[in-house]
Image (cartoon, rainbow, N blue to C red):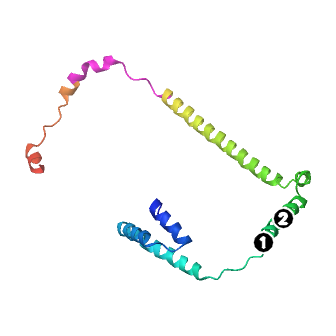
């Protein structure tokens, strides 16, 4: 279905009466510009033709009064139905639902608290592990770094292997 106002206007006109020649020309131009709506229009036209072929059913002269009377009877029956007002509260039909909702809420709160406790416990363990590690050596150890590095030289890279790999 499209929300184009031209299409909707022509569709509503086709519900009420047969389109005039100018309106049909406008419709053909619109459908040429929007071929995806062609199938929708054909279905709509078929439905309009089927509804137009139906015979008019005679309606009794007191039809509206009968419908309004039936609606009033239905409203009165609704008010007389048991379980309305205070007597409905006395039956407590809502109590099992409320108990289930409270149980689910309590389970959710307890789960959240247990998860927070587990995270707090992990944090405490990690802080304890870090505090148990011996402190780093002083920077004085690093003052002889150049001498240590010079005593254990790393081998030179293999130039032939590097050229082959490239």
- Magenta span contains residue 142: yes
Image coords of residue 158 (percent x, y):
11, 43
Q: Magenta region's main secondary structure?
A: helix
In the figure, 74 relative to 115: above or below?
Answer: below
Q: Is residue 4 visible?
A: no
Label 1, residues with CA under 10 Å away: few <14, some 14-19, many ≥20: few
Residue 142 left/right relative to 76: left
| Magenta-drawn segment | 132-147
Q: Are marks 1 and 2 in contact (CB under 8 Å)?
A: no
Image coords of residue 129 (percent x, y):
51, 32
In the figure, 85 relative to 122: above or below?
Answer: below
Residue labelled with disc 1 = 63
Residue 134 left/right relative to 153: right
In the figure, 18 relative to 153: above or below?
Answer: below
Which one is in front, 37 or 145?
37
> Where residue 74 is drawn, which disc sits there?
2
* Distance (Cα) linking label 1 and label 2: 17 Å
> Where residue 12 is drawn, which disc sits there?
none
Which one is in front, 95 or 45?
45
Image coords of residue 155 (percent x, y):
15, 37
Image coords of residue 54 (percent x, y):
62, 82
Callout 2 secondary element:
helix
Residue 114 found in image quarter? top right
> What residue is at 82 percent from the left and 70 percent from the top?
66
> What residue is at 61 percent from the left and 38 percent from the top?
116
Earlier residue among tags 1 and 2: 1
Callout 1 secondary element:
helix
Which one is in front, 60 or 66?
60
């Amino acid at each position: 279905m499209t929300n184009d106002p031209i299409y909707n206007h022509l569709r509503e006109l086709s519900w009420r009466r047969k389109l005039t020649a100018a309106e049909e020309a406008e419709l053909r131009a619109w459908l040429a510009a929007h071929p995806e709506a062609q199938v929708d229009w054909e279905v709509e036209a078929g439905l309009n033709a089927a509804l137009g072929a139906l015979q008019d059913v005679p309606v009794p002269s007191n039809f509206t009064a009968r419908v309004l009377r039936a609606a009033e009877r239905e409203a009165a029956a609704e008010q007389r139905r048991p379980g309305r007002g205070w007597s409905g509260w006395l039956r407590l039909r809502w109590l099992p639902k409320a108990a289930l909702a409270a149980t689910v809420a309590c389970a959710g709160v307890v789960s959240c608290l247990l998860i927070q406790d587990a995270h707090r416990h992990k944090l405490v363990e990690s802080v304890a592990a870090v505090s148990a590690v011996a402190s780093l050596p002083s920077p004085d150890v690093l003052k002889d770094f150049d001498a240590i590095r010079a005593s254990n030289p790393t081998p030179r890279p293999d130039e032939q292997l590097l050229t082959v790999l490239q």
